[in-house]
Image (spheres, helix red, strand yellow):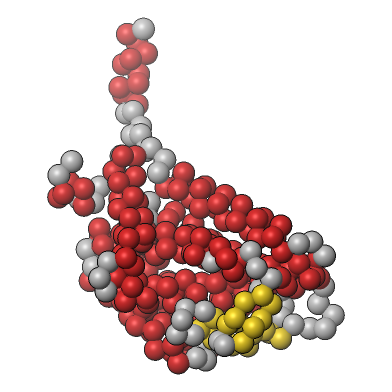
Amino acid sequence: MSAPDFWRVRPGSQTEQVGRLLLAGLVVVFLPSLPFGAYLVYPFIILTTWFHEMGHGLAALAAGQDFQQLMIFANGSGVAQSAVAADAGTWVRVAIAAGGPLGPSVVGALLILASAHQRLWRPTLWLMAGAILASVLLYVRSPTGLLVLPLVAAGLCLVAWRGKPALARFTLQFVGLLAAMSCLRDFDYLFTSAAVVGGQQIVSDTGQIAALTGLPHWLWASVILALSALMIGGSLKAALAERRPKRPANVLQFTQKRR
């Protein structure tokens, strides 16, 4: 397969879909190791932190609680602050705590699915950019978030508006895989009961869930990783499903007559 054929936009075979996703995955894995690669991937690291913290915030809103603000720090860590009612049930608090580590996997799975359908490429990019800008206006209250997130949104808008279809698809795949793989990046955080964020030691997400349920944090970390793997695996399976063209009706009838 030549390079032009690889990037040509058409209903691809399973082999072509695998190749494109593999390329996006290789970029995600090896870009930080290249000269200046860490700087190039940095805005997307901030974006995955945004996915995580917005996961907490949206879970709080869905449970009828008050999502107050989102802080993202220069080292890529972050915190979402929500006012939870004193009478909120245990499982409401568990859902809010679990919403963060599951957020990137949910978004990653949706972006991978969207990358398999050409009609969704540009609308998904516009939607993601709009969501980022809305969150900046409503919730983000840290210098790093206020500086980096609008630049990321502007980049997504530029790709959606002027980028070639192949670039729009690759952007979705790249961001989707980056979000999906952030669970591996946060592996140590999931399997610890406390962490340092913004210079302060806080209870980790799984530590909070453990305190609420009485079950060990490592068990909840394992459950979250398993759910993330199911979501990402399912999205990859759906995105890479072989698309076989339907046989024309007249051909089918002719074949039946010959029998």
Q: Residue at x 30, y 53 (%)?
A: 23
Residue sitting at x 25%, y 70%: 35
Q: Quadrant of the N terminus?
A: top left
Is 231 displayed left or right of 177 in the figure? right
Nearest to the observer: residue 145 or residue 30 = 30
Find residue 36 and report its horizontal and vertical position in percent: 27, 74
- Examine the rendered structure and indicate whether residue 182 appears above or below residue 241: below
Displayed quadrant of residue 158: bottom left
Q: Residue at x 61, y 87 (%)?
A: 200
Location of the C terminus (image quadrant): top left
**Picture mark count:** 0
Q: Position of residue 138 (x, y in %)?
A: 53, 88
Q: Residue at x 66, y 75 (%)?
A: 194
**Residue 254 appearing in the image:** yes
Is residue 187 rendered to the left or right of residue 205?
A: left
Please provide percent x and percent y for residue 214.
82, 65
Hey, which residue is sitting farthest top in the picture? 259
Instruction: Report whether residue 157 is seen.
Output: no
Please give left or right for residue 90 compared with residue 140 in the image. Answer: right
Q: Position of residue 49 (x, y in %)?
A: 50, 75
| Viewer-side residue, 60 vs 3 | 3
